[in-house]
Amino acid sequence: MIRPVELPADVAPALQARLGDAVSLDTPTADLTTYRLGGPAAVLVRATSESALRDITAVLYDHDVPVLVVGRGSNLLVADRGFSGVVVVLDGDFGSVDLDGDHVVAGGAVALPRLARQAAAAGRSGLEFYVGIPGTVGGAVRMNAGGHGRETRDVLVSARVLDLRGDGDPRRRSVDELDLGYRHSSLRAGDVVVDAVLRVGRADPAACRARIDEIVEWRREHQPGGANAGSVFRNPPGDSAGRLIESCGLKGFRVGGAVVSPKHANFFQAEIGATADDVHGLVLDVREQVERATGIRLDPELQMVGFDEEDEGA
């Protein structure tokens, strides 16, 4: 969890001096997340090039301020009072896709469903599982995103990563260096995935599209739509978080406008009028009830930002 702190007064002016209109202050974060909730970010920077990232690092190098890199916000909940730090959103150059033989080079801002479909149309197989993950390439590397029997580490060759508190130069990291595990990598909060090299095979485009259609249909049948952030908790070893939550009779359980989905118990929906605090409260309540009933303490996969909760697992 990234907790609230006071932002040094000189950070925003310094970023504005270097990046101009790409910097905005007190910007709502609700438009940046799939929960469509959350208070303002103290500073929001839309970086469209590596030179812009270098400008950001030049300012942040001497400041110990919280930094949040946001892709499509599909695994993120920002507190209603907002985030007193610097939010970086990638755009522009970071949305490129290069299909090069048996590899795909994709920018950190590329949406995973788009990548899956573009690769399939070009007869490149192996990335179809990404069509069901509403994140970006950068987020996939950071969380070793996966589904339908595959994970990012199965297809990732390497990624270029820039440390926003470093010297401004991206460094290429291998899969081993990234230490990809179950919803885990060695990337830190201030690390930005500039691009990633992904391994693909050759296949009939029609076969690739058929696999994509199959995954999309499965998703519609088994997972809810609407305002949510996908799986809230990581699966504990040898079990399923959704099964544990359902076994405790918590489907439909709610806190305010936040409710455990009747369709999939590890998806928490935000109804109209819900607040980020409602969702946060639901996460804590469900975890407490599951632990009390089963002895298993669920670990949130959802990144929660700007809350005071002192429990490191929240």
Image (tube, rainbow, N blue to C red):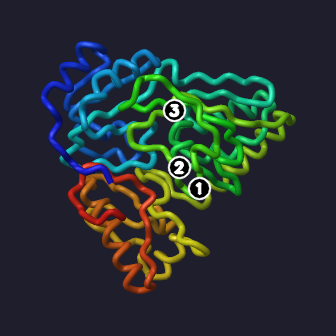
Disc 3 versus disc 2: distance between alpha carbons?
12 Å
In the visual, does 267 lie left or right of 79?
A: right
Residue at 75% across, 42% down: 126
Crowd class of label 2 (few under 14; some 14 to 19; many from 20; radius 10 Å): some
The C terminus is located in which quarter?
bottom left
Residue type, mark 3 in image: Val
For label 2, the residue is 185
**Label 2 secondary element:** loop
Residue 297's spot in the image, x, y percent?
42, 75
The N terminus is located in which quarter?
bottom left
Crowd class of label 1 (few under 14; some 14 to 19; many from 20; radius 10 Å): some
Residue at 62% across, 28% down: 106
Say the numbered circle drawn on residue 161. 3
Disc 1 versus disc 2: distance between alpha carbons?
6 Å
Which one is earlier in the sequence, the residue at label 3 or at label 2?
3
Residue type, mark 1 in image: Gly
* Residues tagged 1 and 2 counted as in contact (Cβ below 8 A): yes
Residue type, mark 2 in image: Ser
In the visual, does 72 lie left or right of 32?
A: right
Identify the image quadrant of residue 130: top right
Residue 285's spot in the image, x, y percent?
31, 72
**Closer to the camera in the image, 195 or 128:** 195
**Label 3 secondary element:** strand
| Identity of the residue furthest to the left in this view | 9
**Label 1 secondary element:** loop
Say the numbered circle drawn on residue 181. 1
**Closer to the camera in the image, 127 or 223:** 127
Residue at 30% across, 52% down: 272
